[in-house]
Image (cartoon, grey):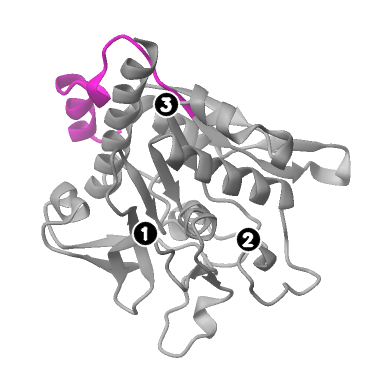
Amino acid sequence: MDANFEETRSSKPKAGRTGIKPMIGVPSSLMTMPAGRMNVHAAAERYIDVLVELCDCIPILIPAIGDQLDYRDMASRLDGIMLTGGRANIEPHNFGGTPFPPDEPIDPGRDATVIGLIRAGIEAEVPIFGSCRGIQEMNVALGGSLHYRVHMLDGKLDHRMPRGEEVPREEIFKLRHRIEMAENSLFAELAGTTEVMVNSLHAQAVDRLAPDLEVVAVSTDGVIEGVRLKNDKTFTVGVQWHAEHEPEVHQLSRRLFEEFGVAAHKRARARRL
């Protein structure tokens, strides 16, 4: 692990810790095990590891059960919500889009779970951090829409991950393009600059921005890469890249997780008093 990351971890108090570990909900994707033996509710391990390391929290997996979940009750029990990436894209009926082709992977349980939970979380002022699919979920939950395939639009880069079973992880998650951030924005403050390189593993992207969100970062081809809730009273942020990948060497990703942790700790203190 990077020596500077080790120094940061040892010399700087993590996420405003107070001895009370916040509970951060991580909505799961519903996945089928090989050979179709069973379905599992799961989230990528890397998100869990980074939340523990940088947010000093207790991650709680939330099953993809849609409206079987009492969204407001769930939100009231959480100190943060981490919206992760996922293989399946959000179904277009959730934002009035054109239906998917028959072979498109879908996860209606996760769609329903996150859309309801995001709305309840924002109402309850629960800190929310969305990565990749997560920024898209935030936009849809608040009334925005999505492009189906960004690379099919004129003037856009191919933002999809490299294809093929033999492609190494380093190639999949390498820094692919630059993003630009407004001066004096949260992102620019955390990054210490207005331009950084990010990875890119998505086909869908934000199209019509939800009215309650504001853009804080865009790629060089104009794709929305970062959003924040207008008049945000806590930390309600979405990014299009996979911020969980190597935050030890990517200052903006690391600082976003740390600020998310600070907000979660603040809520944990207030909620338990």
Residue 117 position within the rendered picture, expressed as x and y whole percent measured from the top left: 56, 40
Counting residues from the N terminus, which is met first, the one under dot 2 or under dot 1?
Answer: 2
Q: Confirm or deny contact between disc 2 and disc 3 (CB under 8 A).
A: no
Residue type, label 3: Asp
Counting residues from the N terminus, which is met first, the one under dot 2 or under dot 3?
Answer: 3
Label 3 belongs to which residue?
A: 79
Residue type, label 1: Leu
Counting residues from the N terminus, which is met first, the one under dot 1 or under dot 3?
Answer: 3
Indicate left or right for 69 with 142 as reference.
right
Please tell me in which quadrant of the rendered image residue 72 appears: top right
Residue type, label 2: Asn
Residue 29 position within the rendered picture, expressed as x and y whole percent measured from the top left: 66, 43
Q: What range is drawn magenta here?
A: 1-24
Badge 3: few (under 14), some or many (20 or more) residues near its Cα, within 10 Å?
Answer: many
Examine the structure image and report whether residue 4 is included in the region drawn in magenta.
yes
Where disc 3 sits, the SS reads: loop
Please tell me in which quadrant of the rendered image residue 42 appears: top right
Q: In the image, which disc is placed on residue 213?
A: 1
Q: CA distance from mark 1 to mark 3?
A: 21 Å
Residue at 27 percent of width and 62 percent of height = 197
Label 2 vs label 3, nearer the camera: 3
Label 1 vs label 3, nearer the camera: 1
Quadrant where the C terminus sits is top left
Q: For this rendering, which residue is in front, 194 or 197? A: 194
